[in-house]
Amino acid sequence: MRKPQGRLTDIFSLPADESGKPRSVLMLDQLTHVPETGDVLRVADRNLHIAQVDGRRTRSCLTGWKLAGRGSVGVLVNEPTDELRPLAQHPNRLWVTWTPKDELPWHFKTDDLPTFTRLNEDWNAHPNDVGLKIEQRGQMLLAHMKPNPYVYRQYEKIPEITVRFEGCERYRVTPINDHGWYGGQCRFSGLAPSWGEFYEISGNTRDDMDPTLWVKMEGAGARHFHFYLRDEALEVKALDWSMQSAS
């Protein structure tokens, strides 16, 4: 079984607690999982029990991949800082692992992992007001939504975009929003490179891990498309896709 890992970037001290225990904060980034209080951190040859996790420092930590700059978090351990600080002086920094007190997500227990290809390179759905509308036309599924004009200025005067799925075999809209994704409620939390994007997923997509019922259609497409929207996620099995904008 693979263990979660991160990179140790800094160590600094805090005043001792009320009982006189020393307190050191270890800063970690490039996380493949979010550590929790009670987990055991392995730093070089030291096992350090995590007494507290500073969630306020957490960014997009659930990545699953070794992507530079993806997330940072501070963990508190009751160990003297002077003894630990040399561990952070490694010229390439130091990769650390930890043993969670709770069960790890499924993707830490298998090598049969799906792969993600981002499809929305120069457009996206509106981050605050998607207004998703689903329309069926025979074997074609139309997903109407508002575009994001803040990042993609070319859509400032475009009221709606439509993602078309040809040869749609089935689709479903799951209740996974950003809070659910970052909280590990999605089966792809920790695998998808980031929330809020449109992906094609190849390999074992573990459809059985989401209880949302599929809506059957007349097509026979088997490609798996997955779009993380503001308040939900759209999953589609179809032959192909395209995007059109309405002026």
Image: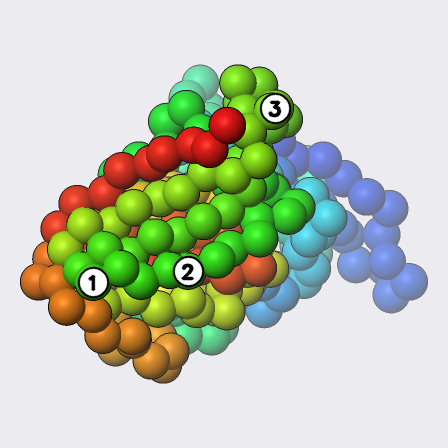
Residue drawn at x 68%, y 53% as measured from the top left: 55
Quick one: SS at disc 3? loop
Residue 213 screen position, x and y as percent: 33, 80
Q: CA distance from mark 3 to mark 1?
A: 32 Å
Report crowding for label 1: few under 14, some 14 to 19, many 20 or more residues within 10 A (C-alpha): few
Residue 143 against residue 186 in the figure, above or below: above
Q: CA distance from mark 1 to mark 2?
A: 13 Å
Q: Amino acid at mark 2?
A: Ile
Q: Amino acid at mark 1?
A: Gly
Residue drawn at x 62%, y 65% as measured from the top left: 37
Residue at the right extreme, as displayed: 18
Residue at the left extreme, as displayed: 220
Quick one: SS at disc 2? strand
Report crowding for label 2: few under 14, some 14 to 19, many 20 or more residues within 10 A (C-alpha): some
| Residue linked to disc 1 | 138
Residue 122 against residue 239 in the figure, above or below: above
Q: Nearer the viewer, residue 23 or 188?
A: 188
Q: Nearer the viewer, residue 120 or 139?
A: 139
Tag of residue 93: none
Q: Amino acid at mark 3?
A: Glu
Choose mark 3 or mark 1, whichever is in front.
Answer: 1
Q: CA distance from mark 2 to mark 3?
A: 23 Å
Residue 127 screen position, x and y as percent: 60, 42
Quick one: SS at disc 1? loop
| Residue linked to disc 2 | 134
Tell which circle, 3 or 1, labels the residue nearer the N-terminal end: 1
Q: Nearer the viewer, residue 92 or 193?
A: 193
Tag of residue 156: 3
